[in-house]
Image (cartoon, rainbow, N blue to C red):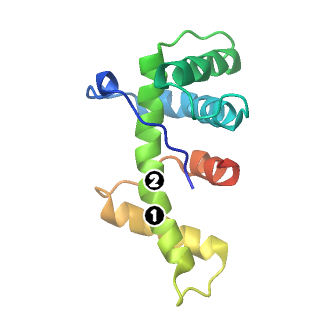
Amino acid sequence: MLINVESDSSSDDPTPERNEEETNEELQPVVEAYVDVSKDNQCGNQQRFDAFWEMVLEHFSVQMGGLERSRHQVNSKWKDLQKKCNAFNSIYNRRMNSVASRRSGADVLQSSLSEYQWTINQKCFPHQQAWEWLKDNAK
């Protein structure tokens, strides 16, 4: 299950194309920062959008050794990752819950990866590591 925080309309601008290598390098800290702030019992994801993302940005900056990014940059990375992870998670959960599926978790994962590639613009699922971390750390 993935955590969902409503976005404000100002961050609905199209995300510019990014180098996949750069994106993958920064995604894990974005995921970790998002989950850490979401799990915080004092604030969690029940706070205002701006305050939530400011805390995520703080955590991200610490994890990246002071690397400066704007809230919009971090939020854009999260939104792209969340969209792809949610699409993959739907496929995975459907296959995992299938009555006909008496296969191992590894088999279900592999068939889910294949279905994702077949149904989502012929592209491989690029965020398996982040998805595995998210599913194991969901609030």
Asked whether disc 2 touches disc 1, contact meaning CB atoms under 8 Å apart, the reply is yes
Quarter of the image where one finds residue 38: top right
Residue located at (51% from left, 67% from top): 92
Comparing 101 with 47, the one in front is: 47
* Amino acid under disc 2: Asn
The disc at residue 86 is: 2
Residue 115 is labelled as none
Rendered view: 9 above or below 54: below
Front-lying residue, 61 or 55: 55
Q: Is residue 11 above or below residue 107?
A: above
- Residue at x-position 55% and y-position 50%: 2
Direction bottom: furthest residue: 100
Query: Marks 2/1: CA distance?
Result: 6 Å
Residue extending farthest right: 41
The residue drawn where x is 47% and y is 17% is 71
Q: Which residue is mark 1?
A: 90
Please give the name of the residue rendered at 46% of the width and 58% of the height, measured from the top-left corner.
88
Name the secondary structure under disc 1: helix
The image position of residue 112, as x and y in percent, is 48, 68
Compared with residue 59, is residue 24 higher up or lower down, i.e. above or below? below
* Residue 24 appears left or right of 32: left
